[in-house]
Image (tube, grey):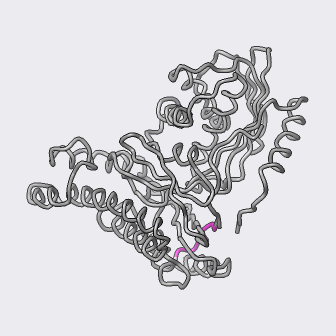
Amino acid sequence: MSHSSNHSSDTSRGAIAAAFREKFGRAPAVVARAPGRIEFIGNHTDYNGGTVLGAAIDRGVWVALAPANTGVRRFASEQMPGVVEQPAGALARLSGPAAWVNYPLGVLAALPEFGLGVPEGFDFLATSDLPSGAGLSSSAAIELASALAFLAVTGQSPSRETVVKAGRYAENHFVGVPCGILDQGVSGFGRKDHLVFIDCRGPRFDTVPMPAGAQFWIFNTHTKHALVDGLYAARHHECMEAAQALGVGLLVEAEPAMLEAAKAKLAPAIYKRAKHIIDEIARVDATVLALRAGDLATVGKNLTASHRSSQLLFENSTAELDFLVDTLTARPHVYGARLTGGGFGGAVMALTSEQFSADDAAQVAAAYAKKFGATPDILHTQTGDGAALLS
């Protein structure tokens, strides 16, 4: 069972600088850090032009970098063996154990698209305290930390929004994942004791204070639907079909009354997908109001309602995720719970008071193990600051 340690960025900066010295025989010129993220509420709303709330967490990825006039780029990670060497001009996608290097390479490919220069030769070291495969978006974290390091050593300081867009560009066009702006936006604009609000049409970024005492618990099932990529694409397609049938560009422009009026001519599945998105966008807005009022009970109800909508209307939940939500919401000190991320497996997030303990979490995990024969990973985490240069 892993619990987050609130180590200060100073100690981590010292640790990665020492590891860099050991690996490359010199000190890094810069160290940058970017956090992982939780999708708080707003499931599949981003590519429908809607709104979404996310939280940067107190775990993330560090990148240490030093320029080199060797014409060679050397990439290393404390989580992976060996050093990956590439000539400075090369931007070919890598596979196998070196595939993690595609994230910093993608950023190097993206920066010129935004009118920004890139360093030629350098030594690069990454390290992370994000659990892998937990759906906390380590990919966005390494993209943003890399971007800040590359920009710092080349003496450039574009807007935070440009850095976020470059990270997303890297993921969409180099890594090849058609993600929305949520992951990079939350990692980039995160702030301790706040949630990040994104209006995906802009995109426009804002922060909303998180009421004191709120805690996040993540239960990662490590289950994954075999057809997850195809199912994600199918939902995307169904949403676009619904928008077209309703005569709007994106579902964010559709009103509930418009959907009900068209119900008879829509296939039942298309109606359900559209209803989830339209209701979910309204839930995001209601959650922002409840957060500003410090009303965690209402926030929790909205989170659980979001899950039920995913379960029954969007149909991107699973028996494992539903069981966790049912078990969590039946317990004291839990405000609400929902699947977090794309769905079709993965993790559930619970929003709790400080009274919810590691013992409570262990009891939930034990009930899950009894039913499914495997134990979920438990991560207790809190909000954290967004991507930053540490030197």
- Please determine whether, in this image, residue 257 is positioned above or below residue 97: below
> How far from the left and from the top, in percent, is residue 253?
24, 48
Residue 311, magenta (yes or no): no
- Please determine whether, in this image, residue 196 is positioned above or below residue 174: below
> How far from the left and from the top, in percent, is residue 128?
71, 48
> How far from the left and from the top, in percent, is residue 309?
33, 66
Going 10% across and 59% down the picture, which residue do you hit?
261
Q: Nearer the viewer, residue 366 or 27?
A: 27
Going 79% across and 15% down the picture, which residue do you hit?
69
Going 64% across and 56% down the picture, which residue do you hit?
384
- Please determine whether, in this image, residue 232 is positioned above or below residue 257: above
The magenta span reads 372-378
> How far from the left and from the top, in percent, is residue 150?
68, 28
Identify the image quadrant of the C terminus: top right
Q: Nearer the viewer, residue 62 or 105?
A: 62
Quadrant of the image occupied by residue 244: top left
- Please determine whether, in this image, residue 170 is positioned above or below residue 53: above
Is 10 displayed left or right of 192 in the figure? right
